[in-house]
Amino acid sequence: MRDIFERAAVATRGHSALASVLPAWTALPHQINATFFSTLGADPTAYLLCRAVQLFVPGTPQIYYVGLLAGLDDTDLYARTANGRDVNRHFYSPDEIAEALAAEVPRAILALVRLRATHAAFDGDFSWEAGGDSLRLAWRTAGASAVLEARVTRGDVGFVLEVSGPDGPVRFDGVTALAG
């Protein structure tokens, strides 16, 4: 956990460490006060891969609005309020929302959300495999499948998403492909 907090501090140029609360009973904060996108250094591929994993594992996924919009830390709001949690609670104007929704990463996340909500494979059976620097998450049902293959080598993060159904197979090999 210490490594995760230290990496977040580096990626956010130190403000996540300042904004995160350190309870008296532990040597580490209980949460990182920074947006997920900022914590990943605003790396679109790493961020979308994290969201893809979130949307592929069993359960009911939930994405906070700042995460959906690939929001970066609002250091101005944090500076005004001194509330550490405000760093990841940007208040979007209608123009900012429209601009964010037109951007590639939020469009790709919305494509993943639509896939999870509508593709028949997610009504089927889930399986997973992990080894070394790779992860494979798959959903299958009669006539439909959705398979996420992730590469998580340090410095080389990527994914391929293959879905099939009545219209045949479709392959997405990154943020741009999903956002299209």
Image (cartoon, rainbow, N blue to C red):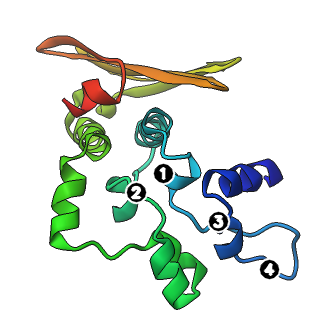
Q: Identity of the amino acid at label 2?
A: Gly
| Residue identified by numbered label 1 | 37
Q: Quadrant of residue 56?
A: top left
For the residue carrying disc 1, how many other residues have a C-alpha within 10 Å: few (<14), some (14-19), or many (20+)? many
Q: Is residue 103 visible?
A: yes
Tell me the element at label 2.
helix
Q: Identity of the amino acid at label 1?
A: Phe
Pinpoint residue 43: horizontal percent, then vertical percent.
Answer: 49, 39
**Which label belongs to residue 16?**
3
Relative placement, left or right, of 61 versus 156 is: left
User: Badges 1 and 2: C-beta atoms under 8 Å apart?
Assistant: yes
Q: Earlier in the sequence, mark 4 or mark 2?
A: 4
Q: Earlier in the sequence, mark 3 or mark 2?
A: 3
| Residue identified by numbered label 2 | 67
For the residues labelled 3 and 2, the Cα–Cα distance comes to: 16 Å
Query: Is residue 82 placed above or below 37 in the rendered structure?
Result: below
Tell me the element at label 3.
helix
Pinpoint residue 156: horizontal percent, then vertical percent.
Answer: 58, 21
| Residue identified by numbered label 4 | 23
Give the label, 3 or 2, closer to the camera: 3
For the residues labelled 1 and 2, the Cα–Cα distance comes to: 7 Å
- Residue at position x 28%, y 38% in the image: 108
Pinpoint residue 174: horizontal percent, then vertical percent.
Answer: 36, 24
User: Badges 4 and 2: C-beta atoms under 8 Å apart?
Assistant: no
Pinpoint residue 158: horizontal percent, then vertical percent.
Answer: 49, 23
